[in-house]
């Protein structure tokens, strides 16, 4: 290949070939003969280079898309973990009696929300119908209160959408 000026011209010719895909246009723009461009194309294996560049580009795009998908997946995993933790805390508060009966509707709403959000993240169907559970607990003794808590727990299980 020899002279540096010719090396640069050949590189420029390859870039123009990639841009236009037409040897005549490349020759015209560089001010050289079309036969010289044809020789350079053959000697420098432009077709192979073009094929390799296209494959590299496809690979790079695939890697970028995979990287973006991994980032989305990691964010979804964090969200799912937080929803599960919230659900566990709320459920524990119900079972230990730390939750005041007046806030049970809010607790049930929270559990419904966490369940729906988890199902959305996991691509499972969600339920759009509203169900209400109300529990009257004023004036109950401990045994009756425990019985109502168990009934409420069963009601909460009914509120949560099942697997379809």
Image: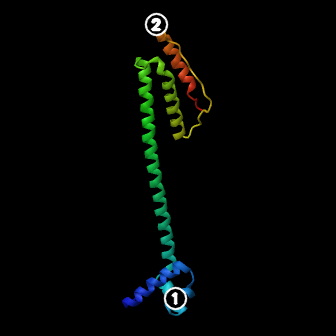
Residue 38 seen in the figure: no
Mark 1 secondary-structure assignment: helix
Above or below 61: residue 90:
above
Q: Position of residue 15 (x, y in %)?
A: 48, 80
Q: Residue at x 52, y 28 (%)?
A: 109
Q: Position of residue 159 (x, y in %)?
A: 57, 25
Residue indicated by mark 2: 143
Q: Earlier in the sequence, mark 1 or mark 2?
A: 1
Mark 2 secondary-structure assignment: helix
Q: Residue at x 41, y 27 (%)?
A: 89
Q: Position of residue 22 (x, y in %)?
A: 57, 83
Gap between marks 1 and 2, in whole Å? 94 Å
Q: Which mark is residue 77?
A: none
Residue indicated by mark 1: 29
Q: From the viewer's side, name the closer residue of 53 and 112.
A: 112
- For the residues carrying marks 1 and 2, which lies nearer the camera in this image? 2
Quadrant location of the N terminus? bottom left
- Label 2, residues with CA under 10 Å away: few <14, some 14-19, many ≥20: few
Residue 34 seen in the figure: yes
Q: Position of residue 139 (x, y in %)?
A: 48, 7
């Amino acid at each position: 290949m020899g002279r540096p000026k010719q090396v640069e011209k050949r590189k420029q010719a390859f870039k123009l070939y990639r841009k236009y895909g037409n040897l005549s246009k490349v020759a015209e723009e560089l001010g050289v003969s079309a036969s010289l461009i044809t020789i350079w194309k053959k000697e420098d294996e432009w077709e192979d280079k073009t094929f390799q560049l296209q494959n590299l580009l496809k690979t790079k795009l695939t890697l970028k898309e995979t990287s973006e998908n991994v980032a989305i997946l990691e964010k979804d995993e964090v969200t799912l973990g937080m929803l599960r933790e919230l659900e566990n805390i709320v459920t524990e508060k119900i079972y230990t009696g730390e939750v005041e009966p007046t806030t049970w509707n809010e607790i049930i709403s929270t559990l419904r929300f966490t369940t729906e959000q988890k199902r959305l993240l996991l691509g499972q169907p969600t339920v759009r119908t509203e169900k209400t559970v109300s529990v009257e607990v004023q004036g109950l003794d401990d045994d009756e209160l425990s019985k109502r808590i168990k009934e409420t727990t069963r009601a909460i299980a009914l509120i949560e959408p099942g697997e379809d």
